[in-house]
């Protein structure tokens, strides 16, 4: 084993498992740090859960079952009872974590969670088998006030707005509705199976209003007027509280509809104060078969609507339950890979350099390498990332080493530092010289080639 | 599905898959941020690789095969040819990443990688089935200078020293040897199968010198004098270059021994300049069957030697090869979970609070919640983490909300802020008030109960 080369041909990427180059990873790191920072400013603490859950828990959410990756020790017996699978979202593991730790957690409990998730679906543009999600949730014990629905929307919009302002990611629009509003409306129309209606309305963007109307009539058994009312409801979209009057004008009445309208109006009004222009009431938002019971959210990037929702979530009356206590929750998830893999792949976002290094300390000859290391130590003591040149090559070659990596400065033993972009070379002291703040760390730049 | 509680009993932890409470996770976050910061100060860039590799690649390292977790889509055909497994270290995926991206990477390429790894071994104290590793490696194309062996040791020691100074983790001692030194010595003794000797010497700590001597005689066929020389070599341990004379005094000669002595002397001498007192030459260090070909490292925490090596690594002449080009590398890995799970579990390390929140903004009544949110926004704009109280309870109850989470300050609409630890309450302005720097973020504290 020991002396044998480990591999013998250039491997090919695995479809559906995107990996970043070092420059791409710098962008991802800065985006994740920005998200974490916003979440922590709002008092959300980080947790991480193990990658695996019992298969029986993962399989509960019926629709997903086919997409689960199972995990097994190579030499385990086939009959082994502790069957495990990789988590396909961060909600199932979070619900389990809440129950497992309920005696040490303080409720309402606010957490964010940034981890990889895995789905065995067919890889395609925007769909991956391994991808990074960032979730925020607030979970209560027995009850959770409605203002937290507003809060998670505001926090996520603020987080996404910072990505827009700081890194040039597209701005976003969050669409919000409420399951109670829709259910109350359908019940007011005399419909028994409101979920059946919701599932058809959820197809609106894909198949169009006419086709959904036919499904509601032929598959769910609605009258044509009732089906048309459902479509009219789904067509309502307003950036302020105007949706309330538009819904009332449809002439349907039900106590649950009234409650849903009030809850949604509250979210829209509070968001317009905190993050103006980024949130709209959009009554076609349904979130399909997911287990939401109140507010539901979807988010698109402006100009990239065809990529679908990049941040979704909502309220669930029972995120988890141990039989005695129910834990209601509300949260939002952002698909980090889903945003970054295409934007970085298309060259819309790039990093100012491919390494953290700000200064390359040149080496005159191998005998003075220790002097170069001492200079680097002085610079690092003040937070300046340094490398010492790997070889005492001619200076031109050492400068090319820096240039190829985008390292902006080269330090010479003569006590001078050169900005290799401008060629300017000035005397400098390693105990006091400081690079411009914009050069200290690599920055994320929005490329002009893309929209 | 929608209205059904997701779970119905308190789940039990999964053996071998440790998870932190929110306070424990704060410690882990700060430790990982500190490691990343040290690595980046030295010009190491972050990469992340996918969790899975082709099983055929993972299985190459024979000894590990039994410990691999295989991964398969739930409904995939058994015969499916693309068999995958979870990576058991970060070296195999890094070698694959280097080959796959060799055309876009600049060599020597310096990367760090902090990710979970999985091993199907029997869970026990200090051995987990899922754990976090932090690796640094420098990899060259065709060649890689010997001074990088010094560099990775210095960087890792500096990183571990910062954990000691900043967070109170135990100090460490790194032991270093060189495979060439050992191999040259054995060859100088006329031994053909130097790996066979190395494997027996590797058992020294476990079974003792007498038993190893017998193995060398009975299993490898050494003469008693030769076996005793091997044990004498393994017994040499010096904090400076004194080991060179001690080895020479054994009277064995071989060109490879001379080369190994020079390489090791260089590492020890450079490390004594950069991180005095933390690195010793220890000639029994062998790293068993691993594929190292030069310098080898092991590291123990002072006072916790029984936990075994918490950071190991070394030089490999061929980290990866595509048949045309060989990529030599040198690196070190630190077992983050292996250090933190026991230290946090035993209460030796704790966090000053369980949430990022520095200030709880109290709410007088639900009608003025928006005012409290505005105050919180002003504080956050200056980087102060805030929560708005979830309920307009009596102030005593709101203060208890903060106290239970360790939130140090409560802000009142009267324009006063209370340090709930001292009870001191002072007038304050949300656009200018700043907490003491030590309170801004949770800090890691070394508890006095443990050693």
Image: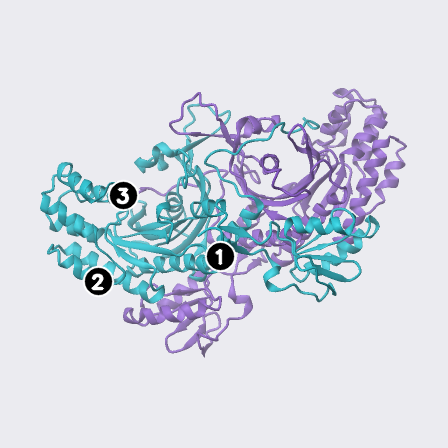
Chain colours: A purple, B cyan
Q: Chain of mark 2?
A: B
Residue B115 % position (x, y): 46, 46
The residue located at (79%, 30%) in the rendering is A183
Query: Between marks 2 and 3, how big is the CA–CA gap?
Result: 25 Å
* Secondary element at image label 3: loop
Q: Please say whether residue A302 is visible from this viewpoint.
A: no
Residues indicated by labels 2 and 3 sit on the same polypeptide chain: yes
A293 shown above or below B106: above
Residues at discs 2 and 1 both on one chain: yes
Task: Check contact, mark 1 vs mark 3: CB within 8 A.
Answer: no
Q: Residue A99 location, x and y as percent? A: 61, 34
Question: Label 1 belongs to which residue?
Answer: B167
Which residue does the numbered mark 2 point to in the structure image?
B242
Crowd class of label 2 (few under 14; some 14 to 19; many from 20; radius 10 Å): few
Q: Residue at x 37, y 78 (%)?
A: A414
The residue identified by callout 3 is B288
Reply above or below: B93 against B233. above
Instruction: Name the one closer to the observer, B408 or A316.
Output: B408
């Amino acid at each position: 084993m020991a002396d044998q080369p480990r591999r013998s041909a250039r491997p090919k990427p695995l479809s559906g498992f995107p990996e970043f180059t070092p420059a791409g990873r710098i962008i991802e790191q800065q985006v994740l740090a920005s998200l974490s920072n916003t979440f922590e400013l709002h008092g959300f603490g980080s947790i991480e859960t193990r990658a695996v859950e019992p298969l029986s828990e993962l399989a509960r959410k019926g629709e997903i079952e086919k997409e689960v990756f199972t995990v097994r020790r190579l030499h385990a017996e086939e009959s082994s009872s502790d069957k495990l699978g990789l988590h396909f979202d961060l909600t199932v593991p979070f619900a389990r974590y809440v129950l497992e730790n309920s005696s040490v957690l303080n409720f309402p409990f606010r957490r964010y969670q940034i981890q990889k998730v895995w789905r065995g679906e067919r890889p395609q543009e925007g769909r991956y088998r391994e991808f990074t999600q960032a979730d925020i949730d607030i979970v209560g014990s027995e009850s959770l006030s409605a203002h937290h629905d507003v809060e998670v929307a505001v926090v996520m919009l603020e987080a996404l707005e910072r990505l827009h302002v700081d890194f040039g990611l597209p701005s976003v629009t969050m669409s919000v509705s409420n399951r109670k509003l829709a259910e109350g409306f359908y019940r007011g129309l005399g419909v028994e199976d409101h979920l059946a209606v919701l599932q058809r309305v959820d197809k609106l963007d894909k198949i169009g209003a006419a086709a959904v109307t036919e499904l509601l009539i032929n598959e769910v058994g609605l009258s044509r007027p009732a089906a048309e009312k459902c479509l009219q409801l789904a067509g309502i979209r307003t950036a302020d509280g105007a949706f309330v009057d538009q819904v009332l004008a449809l002439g349907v009445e039900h106590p649950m509809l009234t409650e849903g309208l009030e809850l949604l109006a509250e979210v829209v009004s509070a968001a317009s104060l905190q993050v103006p222009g980024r949130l709209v009431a959009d009554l076609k938002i349904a979130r399909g078969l997911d287990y939401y019971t109140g507010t539901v959210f979807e988010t698109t990037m402006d100009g990239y609507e065809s990529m679908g929702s990049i941040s979704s979530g909502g309220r669930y009356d029972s995120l988890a339950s141990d039989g005695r206590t129910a834990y209601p929750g509300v949260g939002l998830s952002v698909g980090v890979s889903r945003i970054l893999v295409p934007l970085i792949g298309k060259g819309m976002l790039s990093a100012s350099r491919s390494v953290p290094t700000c200064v390359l300390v040149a080496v005159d000859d191998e005998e003075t390498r220790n002097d170069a290391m001492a200079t680097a130590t002085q610079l690092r003591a003040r937070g300046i990332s340094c490398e010492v040149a790997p070889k005492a090559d001619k200076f031109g070659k050492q400068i090319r080493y820096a240039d190829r990596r985008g390292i902006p400065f080269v330090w010479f033993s003569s006590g001078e530092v050169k900005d290799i972009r401008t060629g300017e070379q000035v005397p400098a002291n390693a105990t006091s010289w400081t690079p411009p703040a914009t050069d200290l760390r690599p920055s994320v730049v929005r490329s002009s080639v893309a929209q």
